[in-house]
Amino acid sequence: MKYFKKYEDYSTFLNEAKVNFSKAGFKAKWQEKLDSLNKYVEENPEADWLDDSISKIKDIIKSGKLSWKDHLYIGSVDEDGNYDIFKGSNATLGAKELVKIVNKYKKDEVKQTSVGAAPNSTRFKAAVGGMVDLMINEPVYDGFQGKTLLIGIKVGGGVDRSTKDKIFQEAYEMLMPLDQYNSKNGGISIFITEGTNWSCIGLSSTQFGFNSNVENKLKSLI
């Protein structure tokens, strides 16, 4: 895994633009993606297969709503390592927003339990977590592809499903303004995985992770 040293360089510039983590920031990110798609269609009139995505994004911008379960992996401005999460205090601000969500739902944590690891199994047990935790710079896997989850939230499989959905939705809306997905290497993109022990939602990268100083700084927020 590469460590993105540029983060520390950017943090010295006080005038670096900050990401808006409000509903307005959520809608602005989708507007950015819509503008990118519209530009592509103008240059490639035969790309009418994008019409459905364009229609969906217009609905998102109008309503300001999209479920984390229906996330659209659509690129916007082509980035080459110059990602917003590594600029200024954006990572810290994003992590702070996630900490608010973690603290809000800490009361809903449950004790870790176990279940049969296979149908009708009494011999082999699988752990079922009960945590609601902040995730910083942790390795995750998408199929066989390794990624680094830069910032996110982990929810144990024992936490009530409706509570997990609320956590994921709130985290999704906070994370989305930092999403900079691209089809080349994934960029910085929304990552969601669900399992028996725990599930998580966050921002991931196949190329970059925080260096230890930034990682420790973000972990100290909880």
Image (cartoon, rainbow, N blue to C red):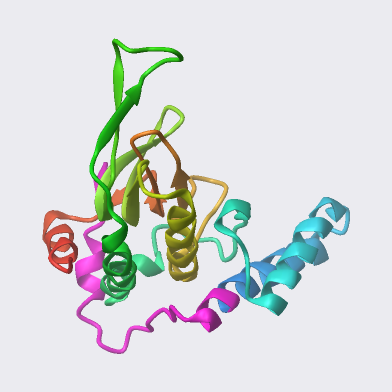
Instruction: Specify whether residue 26 is painted magenta.
Output: yes
Measured as percent of width and height from the top left, residue 215 is found at 17, 58
Is the residue 129 above or below the residue 211 in the image? above
Q: Residue at x 61, y 73 (%)?
A: 32
Q: Residue at x 32, y 50 (%)?
A: 154
Q: Residue at x 41, y 78 (%)?
A: 19
Measured as percent of width and height from the top left, residue 141 is found at 38, 35
Is the residue 155 above or below the residue 28 in the image? above
Is the residue 145 above or below the residue 168 in the image? above
Is the residue 13 above or below the residue 162 in the image? below
Residue 187 seen in the current view: no
Measured as percent of width and height from the top left, residue 161 is found at 47, 49
- Write down the quadrant of residue 26 in the picture: bottom right
Measured as percent of width and height from the top left, residue 80 is found at 44, 58
Range drawn in magenta: 1-27
Nearest the viewer among 148 and 115 is 115
Nearest the viewer among 58 and 153 is 153
Nearest the viewer among 101 and 75 is 101
